[in-house]
Image (tube, rainbow, N blue to C red):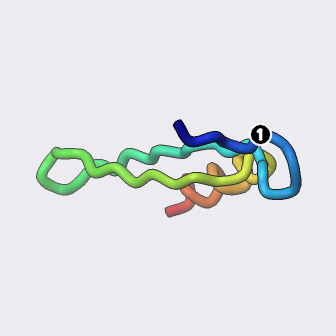
């Protein structure tokens, strides 16, 4: 069984952002992105502008 490191420089809390976009034909497309927890608000603002 593989071990995961939970402390140290390489370990940061991450958040997964999923953005839904409605297409012209009525269906939805989804984009997802993993970002550091500290950058979530900035990424949400950027996603809303697109």
Residue 49, compared with residue 20, is above or below; it is below
Where residue 2 sits, quadrant-wise, is top right
How many numbered dots are placed on residues in this image? Answer: 1
Instruction: Specify whether 22 is left or right of 3.
Output: left
Where residue 9 sits, quadrant-wise, is bottom right
**Of residues 13 and 6, the one drawn nearer to the viewer in this rendering:** 6
Q: Which residue is mark 1?
A: 6
Residue 31, compared with residue 15, is above or below; it is below
Which residue is depicted at the point 16% across and 45% down? 26
For mark 1, does the 10 Å Cα neighbourhood hold few (<14), some (14 to 19), or many (20 or more) residues?
A: few
Where residue 10 sits, quadrant-wise, is bottom right
* Image x and y of residue 13, in percent: 74, 42
Residue at the right extreme, as displayed? 8
Q: Secondary structure at mark 1?
A: loop
* Image x and y of residue 36, in percent: 72, 52
Which residue is depicted at the point 52% across and 54% down? 33
Instruction: Specify whether 20 is left or right of 37.
Output: left
């Amino acid at each position: 069984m593989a071990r995961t490191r939970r402390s140290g420089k390489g370990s940061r809390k991450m958040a997964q952002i999923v953005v839904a976009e409605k297409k012209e034909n009525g269906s939805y497309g989804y984009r997802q992105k993993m970002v550091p927890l500290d950058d979530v608000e900035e990424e949400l603002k950027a996603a809303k502008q697109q």
